[in-house]
């Protein structure tokens, strides 16, 4: 099962310690953004997001630690779409390492309610569901994949015909005898 990070635990992955990975949380899903440490680590343009739940900041396009939270209640449809675009980018570029929790072990023991920061707050993170969501957001639609397969097969057939023509061989004859 994926790890659940309290806000305090998540903050330990803010990029200030170069021996630790850099994590950010978006809608309760924690991503390892270490591959882009120059952006999210200390001194980077998005360092305010590191070690925090930053759904709101991404939605309203404001790089400010004060806006790094999961409160999306007053966001417009356009801002929510912007957030979904960010999530699609994170899902294709970064690894999911866990979920963001609320308030630590005491809150978990008390049966804390899900926060507005994400639908996985107090549920198990279903990595298969996340993988399926990533595939749904893939630019390779089934129609495109079918077209690519057909083009590949036609290219192979054209190569075979060209080979036969260049070598002067006769194409294979179908067997007529049983």
Image: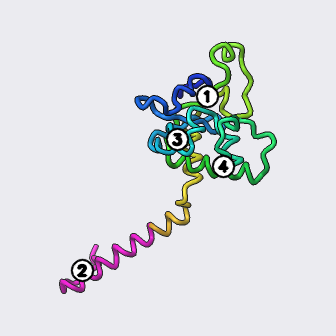
Sooner in the amino-acid sequence: mark 1 or mark 2: 1
Sooner in the amino-acid sequence: mark 3 or mark 2: 3
Task: Confirm whether the magenta stretch covers residue 115.
Answer: no
- Magenta highlight range: 149-178
Sooner in the amino-acid sequence: mark 4 or mark 3: 3
User: Could you tell me which residue is drawn at 64 percent across and 34 percent down?
Assistant: 53
User: Could you tell me which residue is drawn at 72 percent across and 28 percent down?
Assistant: 114
Q: Position of residue 7 (x, y in %)?
A: 62, 25
- Disc number lying in front (4 or 1): 4
Q: CA distance from mark 1 to mark 2?
A: 56 Å
Task: Confirm whether the magenta stretch covers residue 166.
Answer: yes
Q: Position of residue 162 (x, y in %)?
A: 27, 82
Mark 4 in CB contact with mark 1 (< 8 angstroms):
no
Principal secondary structure, stretch drawn in magenta:
helix
Identify the residue under disc 1: 124
User: Could you tell me which residue is drawn at 59 percent across and 50 percent down?
Assistant: 88
Residue 1 visible in the current orientation: no
Identify the residue under disc 4: 84
- Disc number lying in front (2 or 4): 4
Residue 143 placement, left or right of 120 = left
Crowd around label 2: few <14 · some 14–19 · many ≥20 (10 Å): few
For the residue pair 117 and 154, the one nearer the viewer reads as: 117
Residue 80 visible in the current orientation: yes
Q: Quadrant of the C terminus?
A: bottom left
Q: CA distance from mark 1 to mark 3?
A: 27 Å
**Looking at the picture, does residue 121 appear above or below residue 63?**
above
Sooner in the amino-acid sequence: mark 1 or mark 3: 3
Identify the residue under disc 2: 163
Residue 114 placement, left or right of 93 = right
Q: On residue 39, which mark appears?
A: none
Sooner in the amino-acid sequence: mark 2 or mark 4: 4
């Amino acid at each position: 099962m994926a790890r659940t990070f309290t806000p305090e635990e998540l903050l330990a992955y803010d990029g200030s310690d170069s021996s630790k990975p850099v994590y950010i949380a978006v809608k309760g899903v924690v991503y390892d953004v270490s591959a882009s440490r120059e952006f999210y680590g200390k001194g980077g343009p998005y360092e305010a997001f590191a070690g925090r739940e930053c759904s709101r900041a991404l939605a309203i396009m404001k790089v400010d630690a004060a806006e790094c939270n999961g409160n999306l209640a007053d966001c417009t449809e356009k801002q929510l779409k912007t957030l979904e675009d960010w999530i699609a980018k994170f899902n294709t570029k970064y690894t999911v390492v866990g979920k963001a929790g609320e308030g630590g072990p005491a809150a978990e023991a008390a049966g804390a309610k899900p926060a507005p920061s994400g639908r996985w707050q107090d549920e198990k993170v279903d990595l298969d569901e996340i993988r399926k969501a990533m595939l749904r957001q893939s630019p390779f639609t089934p129609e495109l994949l079918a077209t690519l397969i057909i083009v590949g097969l036609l290219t192979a057939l054209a190569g075979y015909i060209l080979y036969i023509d260049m070598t002067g061989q006769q194409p294979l004859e179908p067997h007529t005898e049983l």
